Image (cartoon, rainbow, N blue to C red):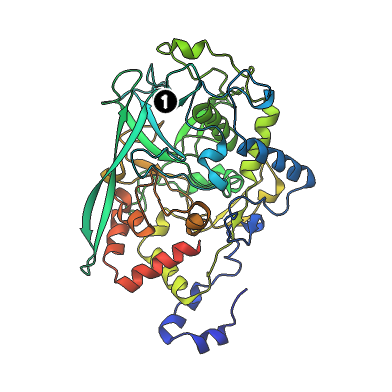
Amino acid sequence: MLVPVALWFSLASCEESAFLDELEINEQFSGGRATVFNRSVNAFGLPAPGLTRQEERLFGVGNSFFNQNWVQSPASTTARDGLGPFFNARSCASCHFKDGRGRAPEFDAESPTGFVVRVSLPDQQNAFGAPTAHPGYGGQVQDNAVLGVQKEATVILRYEEIPGTYADGTPYSLRKPMVSFQDEAHGSLDGLDLSPRVANHMSGMGLLEAVPESTLYALADPDDVDGDGVSGRINMVWNEQEGRVTPGRFGWKANQPNLEQQVASAFHGDIGITSTAFPDANCSAESPDCAEQPNGGDPEIDEDDLGKVVLYSAALAVPARRNWEEPQVLRGKRYFREIGCESCHVSKLETGPSGIADVFSYQTIRPYTDLLLHDMGEGLADNRSDFLASGREWRTPPLWGIGLFKTVNGHTNYLHDGRARNLAEAILWHGGEAEAAKERFRHLDADERDAIIAFLESL
């Protein structure tokens, strides 16, 4: 609830009370009506309030498909057979544990948890701009395979420490990931376009889908007409449903146009499950033992069951802000805006009509994203193009729920590949269009930096 202003003046110092104008009515409701007040380990896994009874029932069934493992065919579990032949995970929840965020392996022998490496041929794209898959490895290195099939490779991740210093003399260190491989089944992966990725948390995806395309076009400034150094772009991607190119909004490079295609693509690429959108098994001419494996049906997940997983993914609620009215958080909120972070991490958006559930329609939401591509500099570049996204461009990730990663998933690893070990490191990796904002952060004093971190942790 809002704290009466008179009480604030009695409790806060004069300096702190100067930030009272940062208070906004209902800003704790990050997801509008689809907000839940829960800060527990289950904060990302709750249904949005306001679902109909039918939607709640479908949410429960979708939850089952999301969490239960798929198995190799043939099997008595006919509704969930068809795993692989190549795969990175056995279930959606293997990557999105508790509907949260994945993590890169911390040491050589550790199995990845929601971590994959995308792969494609250098400087090659199809007519629509999609990366050209490798003839053996496809579009993603698969580090698991069913019995009777050789896995594609073992991923090895190591880090190089890069020292730095804040303007006040405080030292810091950033870690740069270096990916290598063992047991490569189709020749060396050296020289290919590679992009390590971690799975993001699932909150609020139905709300993001309901943001009108007109909003994306209004936020985009590809030629930096306003001269602020920030030039967000829409990624135009292939839409399987519509058979044409449409704006992308999901994925680290906004390479998926809608939630249904995002879910179907993850089933296909991560678990090896075919659907009407992606009907062919993830096999290649270089893997004859793959093509000989029995499947779990044509397709292996039908449209009805896929729709339940889409509804489940869409209907996961957004956790409410914590400590949003505290003086330090309000100070951090202002600093966040003043140093330029909101140029990309747009604090407030309005949804339009939702094609998934009415609860997502016409809501004021606070996701802190513009869903656009931004050049993030050479330090974060994967040098792998994806439709219109260059090797230096990434979609602005939503920040809602970011302060609960530690609670839900037991780690504070951020950015597209999990390299940042805390929020300060995530900011310090920013470059390109965000270079000026990063430098302003680096020149703040310790109390000001701490206030920004406290604000982010409240989201």
Of helix, strand and loop, which one carries label 1?
A: loop
Q: Is residue 361 visible?
A: no
* 116 relative to 241 in the view: left or right: left
Residue marked by disc 1: 139
Q: Position of residue 85 (x, y in %)?
A: 51, 20
The residue located at (27%, 60%) in the rendering is 439
Horizontal arrangement in the rendering, residue 186 relative to residue 303 (left or right): left
Q: Nearer the viewer, residue 335 or 271?
A: 271
Q: Residue furthest bottom?
A: 10
Residue 363 in the image: above or below residue 183: below
Q: Residues within 10 Å of mark 1 (few under 14, many from 20)?
A: some
Quadrant location of residue 172? Answer: bottom left
Which residue appears at 40% of the width and 83% of the height? Answer: 15
What is the total number of numbered labels drawn onto the structure image?
1
Q: Position of residue 69 (x, y in %)?
A: 59, 33
Q: Residue 58: image x %, image y %?
A: 73, 40
Vertical relation: 66 (above or below) 334 = above
Identify which residue, 234 or 182, lies in the foreground: 182
Residue furthest right as drawn: 53
Report if residue 450 is visible in the image.
Answer: yes
Q: Position of residue 173 (x, y in %)?
A: 25, 56
**Image quadrant containing the N terminus:** bottom right
Front residue (pair 291, 21): 291
Residue type pointed to by label 1:
Gly
For residue 183, above or below residue 322: above
